Image (tube, rainbow, N blue to C red):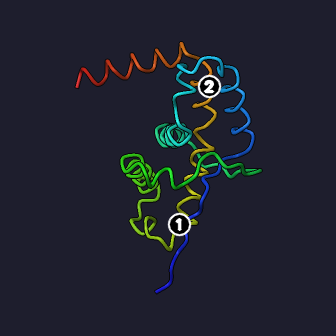
Amino acid sequence: MKKYKEPALANIDQKYKIQLDVIKKKHEDNPEHYVNRLEAKYIYIFAIIMALKYKLKPVESKKKAWIFRTEGLKRDEESETIFKSLIFSFKKDIKILLPENYEEYYSIAEKLANAGMERTLKLLNSSDEIEKMILVESQKFLKN
């Protein structure tokens, strides 16, 4: 039986990694700022959610940069489950979750994260937008 190796790093387009680093640098003196409390994997997952929610076209990285180690997903069962669910919901083929498809799986994740990262970074850079989004989503949740 062939052993398939999962990639060690999750990638994103370098321009988004640089923009994220700039936002983090801007708030480095405030450890309580939400951008400093969010792990990169959560930002990545949120970018994928944005791409799916707004039906954005997946975007290939022009130059790859790693954003987090994939082992971080393995240690967080909830995040890993959400991540897998998002990729499956895009691909609509359960086989994408098989180890022999790791390369395609992470390629899809990267392209979706790239597609949603512009909106995600805009939100991270604007606390007013984050607060509005939380209020709007909370109201929707309370109505259901």
Residue 48: x %, y % from top left = 52, 43
Q: Who is closer to the viewer here, 144 or 74? A: 74
Q: Residues within 10 Å of mark 1 (few under 14, many from 20)?
A: some
Q: What is the secondary structure assignment of the residue under circle 2?
A: helix
- Residue lying at the far left in this picture: please name it: 144
Q: Residue at x 36, y 47 (%)?
A: 78
Please, what is the three-letter code of the amino acid marked with disc 1? Tyr
**Residue 50 in the image: above or below residue 105:** above
Q: Is residue 144 left or right of residue 34?
A: left
Residue underneath mark 2: 122
Task: Indicate the amino acid at tag 2.
Answer: Lys
Q: Is residue 28 above or below residue 111?
A: above
Marks 2/1: CA–CA distance: 30 Å
Q: Residue furthest right?
A: 63
Q: Position of residue 31 (x, y in %)?
A: 57, 21
The residue located at (61%, 42%) in the rendering is 115
- Residue 133, located in which quarter of the rendered image? top left
Task: Kindly identify the residue that appears in the image at 42 percent across and 57 percent down.
Answer: 88
Q: Which residue is mark 1?
A: 102
Count of number-bearing discs? 2
